[in-house]
Image (cartoon, rainbow, N blue to C red):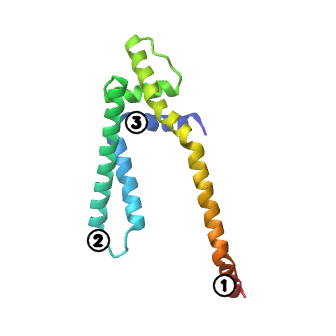
Amino acid sequence: MDYEEIGAASALKRRLDSSLTAQAVLAFLLALSVTALFSRPDEHPTSRLLRSVLHAGMGVVFMVVQRRRIGRAAGTDASRLADLNRKIRHREVPTDPGERAAMRRLVAKHLRPVERGRRWLPYWMGLMGLIAVGVLVLGAATDSLQSALQEQDERVS
C-alpha cells in the first residue's frame, strides 16, 4: 500500500467518524444491499427501497441516541466526541484541563461495559461450550450425522 492509499483511507475514516450524514449514507447502502439479498425476486424495487430507508433510519436514530448519551456522560457535546475518540486512539493527551476531564469521563464510560463483560465472559463461554456439546450429543443420539454421510455416499456412487 502506498502513502496515497493510506491517506485516502485515513480521510475516509475521519469523514465517517465525524459526519453523521456519511454514516447515514453508509447505513442506507448496507441496508439496501442486505434487503436486496434477502428479498424475493418478484418483489417491487420500491418496497425494497422503502424497507432500506426504514432500516437505515432506525440505525441512524440508534447512533444519534448513543452519541448523545455518551456525550452527556463525558460532559461534552456530541460533535466533540469524534475528536476525543480520535485522541484516545492515537494516545494524545490534551493540554486543556476541561478537555482532559472530558476525556477521563469518556474513557471511564467506555471501560464500564468492558469490565462488566470481563466478569460474565467465563459464564458465557461455559454456556456456549455446553450448547456445542449438547448439539454434538443430540446429533450422535439421533444418528443424523451417519445418515447424512450415507446419503452423500449414495449420491456420489
* Crowding near the residue tagged with mark 2, few <14, some 14–19, many ≥20 C-alpha atoms within 10 Å: few
- Residue 59 position (above or below residue 109): below
Residue at mark 2 to residue at mark 1: CA–CA distance: 39 Å
Q: Which residue is mark 1?
A: 151
Q: Is residue 12 left or right of residue 146?
A: left
Residue at 33% x, 23% y is 76
Residue at mark 2 to residue at mark 3: CA–CA distance: 33 Å
Residue at 60% x, 44% y is 122
As drawn, the label of residue 118 is: none
Q: Is residue 46 left or right of residue 147?
A: left
N-term-proximal mark, 1 vs 3: 3
Of labels 1 and 3, the one closer to you = 1
Please state the total of marks drawn on the protein image.
Answer: 3
* Crowding near the residue tagged with mark 1, few <14, some 14–19, many ≥20 C-alpha atoms within 10 Å: few
User: Helix, strand or loop at disc 2?
Assistant: loop
Across and down, in percent, residue 43 comes to: 32, 73
Q: Which residue is mark 2?
A: 44
Residue at mark 1 to residue at mark 3: CA–CA distance: 53 Å
Q: Which residue is mark 3?
A: 15
